[in-house]
Amino acid sequence: LPNPTEFAPAAQDLWGAMDHGKRYGGRTLLRFNGHFFKDAEALPLTADDLVVLQEAATADWSDVEPSIFGTLLTRALDPKERHRLGAEYTPPEFIARIVRPTVEEPIRERWTAVQAEVLQIREGGRPKDKKLAEQRLRDFHEWLRQLRFLDPACGSGNFLYVTMHIVKRIEVEVMNELFNVTGTRELRFHEVDPSQFYGIEKKPWAREIAELTLWIGFHQFWRRTHGDVQPEEPILRDTWTLANRDAVLESTGSKRDPSRDRQDPTPRLRHPVTGELVPDPTRKLEYRTVLSPRETEWPPAEFIIGNPPFMG
């Protein structure tokens, strides 16, 4: 195990090398970029912490289900905070029930029509027919690459993650059809990626998890599709598609009105007679007035999916 006092600076050096694609430990690392490693500050760990970390590092994480981060996120929240936010983890199976009819079926309807057209064109058997069929497939893929998907209450990004995988499965079919037409397997295909997936989320740590979930999912899909072919660098990119703000209301701030504060009903103190928890009479719930409220403007998108907050 590394010395606990040396772990934090060593981790910071590693993350800095990953961010810029520099040499570390005798090898040149891939360039990750994105903002994940721009802040290379590492938390100090104790010897016991390092034992747990080493145990975790021996596991094979290559096929980890990224949506598990949603479970970890909601379990880390205080139950009352989770209820107030309406932050509930939605399993991928439930998400698919919404995404299939709202996203997959409309796209597949168009894809089926293109496949039929390509089949009819190829029946001509002439070189120009082959070229025309290839162009129809490329036009459809370009349309697929231009689509935008929005989850206006994205949480840890599970709806976006499931949607991306559904769209990329269709993309693989397009790539296979192109191979059938051209006889060439393209390795540097400008693919559907996280830059097409938009989200709005109030909690900054949930927004960060959503972005990480999308990129992990993208690279897992890349590896399953392309094997050992290295994706283009940087491995991670800032897409600027996941906003950290309220999805319904924007304002210039808020102003407290002490005259309208009310008693905090949360039990906090032990009653001197009964021993039960009772509210603290000195604690108040602040009443705040929103300044210059206005409706939040959502980014334009062809598909809007998601699981709205359960409260509010």
Image (cartoon, rainbow, N blue to C red):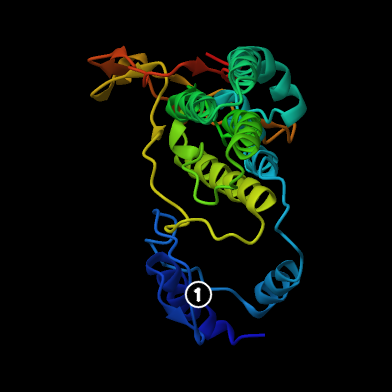
Q: Is residue 269 above or below residue 42?
A: above
Mark 1, Cα crowd under 10 Å, few <14 / some 14-19 / many 20+, is some
**Image quadrant assignment for residue 278:** top right
Does residue 148 show up?
Answer: no
- In the picture provided, is 33 more to the left or to the right than 117? left
Please tell me which residue is depicted at 58% across the width and 82% down the height of the picture. Answer: 4
Of 38 and 259, which appears nearest the observer? Answer: 38
Please tell me which residue is depicted at 70% across the width and 69% down the height of the picture. Answer: 57
Please tell me which residue is depicted at 40% across the width and 65% down the height of the picture. Answer: 19
Residue 61: x and y in percent read 71, 59
Of 147 and 273, which appears nearest the observer? Answer: 147
Residue 262: x and y in percent read 44, 18
Q: Residue furthest front?
A: 126
Of 129 and 159, which appears nearest the observer? Answer: 129
Residue 217: x and y in percent read 61, 44
Q: Is residue 43 above or below residue 71?
A: below
- Quadrant placement of the N terminus: bottom right
Residue for badge 1: 11
Please tell me which residue is depicted at 40% across the width and 24% down the height of the picture. Answer: 246
- In the picture provided, is 294 more to the left or to the right than 197? left
Residue 154: x and y in percent read 53, 28
Q: Is residue 80 above or below residue 77?
A: above
Query: What's under tag 1, amino acid-wise?
Result: Ala
Of 9 and 114, which appears nearest the observer? Answer: 114
Does residue 40 show up?
Answer: yes
Exactly how many numbered labels are in the figure?
1
The secondary element bearing badge 1 is classed as helix
- In the picture provided, is 110 more to the left or to the right than 232? right
**Image quadrant assignment for residue 295:** top left
